[in-house]
Image (cartoon, helix red, strand yellow):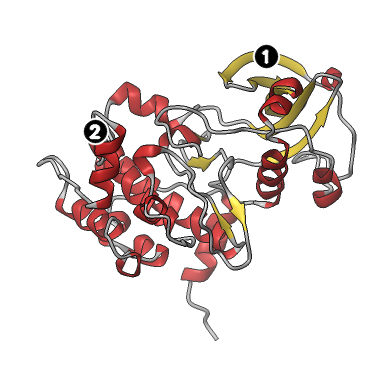
Amino acid sequence: MGVHRRQYGPLFSFFFFFLVAATGQTGPSTPTMRRFTIDDFEIGCPLGKGKFGNVYRARHFIVALKVLFQSRIEKEGLGHQLRGETEIQAHLQHHNILRLYNCFHDARRVYLILEYAPRGKLYKELQKSHMFDKLCTATVMEELADALTYCHDKKVIHRDIKPENLVLGLMGEVKMADFGWSVHIPSLRRKTMCGTLDYLPLEMIEGKTYNEKVDLWCLGVLCYELLVGNPPFESASHSETYRRILKVDVRFPASIPLGARDLISRLLRYQPSEWLLLAQVLKHPWVRAPSRRVLPPAAQMASLALSTPILL
């Protein structure tokens, strides 16, 4: 169970072979199948470091290359988790979800070829500024609500939305980047307790069967953290954090706008049946009014086509 704040959950193992067979993808400009080796890449500066490996900027096309050590993954028995994680991420194609293009291995390492997010992790930006303004936060909420709608339509529950698992693209757009706790299941019903302590939905803590709505709870916690600088249930001890989650003890500082309070309070409620739906999050006035979301050209054209009346 991964429930510790600011620690990375299990990452990957080396069972990657199904990926190319399942997707036939090797990158944005190479649609045919190809077997890569490390010699195909010019390795650049490090982008991050985890328990099981490191991430580097690399050039073949510009990518982020995650390098994982097989011995460490085997030791932790995480082969099954990698297989599920990479299979899910490889099949998701949305402008607010980081692409996984392909993977390969040598005798000691596994290499994941990921989309490069030039502005880095959202968590680092939050650390620099301590908190985000309403324009930035509303934009993040709209982007993630749209990405989660796409995931849920594909029967995928993310289960670990938090600043550490989000990165920023070239135009500052948010991308979901870590699917270590995600699951694909047709029924969307689960009982596994997983994620990050400050973001744990009360259904998980109570050991109840839950569905994709747990991602909505995390969205509410994230909105609060972006506006305040720390998550709403953060406490001095784990037991106190659990207690506050179970009581849905949310304390709003005066700095949070009334519209944001309404959104957060309608996502963080004891009864999941009372939580807003993702479609309602996208239509919420506080999200719609200040959001400065930037869509890629193809999505802009689709949006324009849907909003333009047809003259007969």
Outermost residue toward the bottom in this view: 312
Above or below 205: residue 4? above
Which label's residue is closer to the chain start, 1 or 2? 1
Q: Nearer the viewer, residue 63 or 192?
A: 192
Q: Is residue 274 left or right of residue 298?
A: left
Q: Residue 281, image x and y in percent? A: 35, 61
Q: Residues within 10 Å of mark 2 (few under 14, many from 20)?
A: some
Of residues 192 and 257, the one drawn nearer to the viewer in this rendering: 192
Q: Amino acid at mark 1?
A: Gly
- Quadrant housing the C terminus: bottom right
Query: Label 2's element?
Result: loop
Find residue 25 and report its horizontal and vertical position in percent.
80, 45
Judged from the image, the secondary structure of the residue bearing numbered disc 1 is strand
Residue 309 x %, y %: 48, 76
At x 65% / y 42%, what residue is drawn?
Answer: 99
Tell me residue 39's x, y (percent). 85, 18
| Residue type at the position of mark 2 | Ser
The numbered mark at residue 44 is 1
Q: Residue at x 70, y 51 (%)?
A: 91
Disc 2 target residue: 235
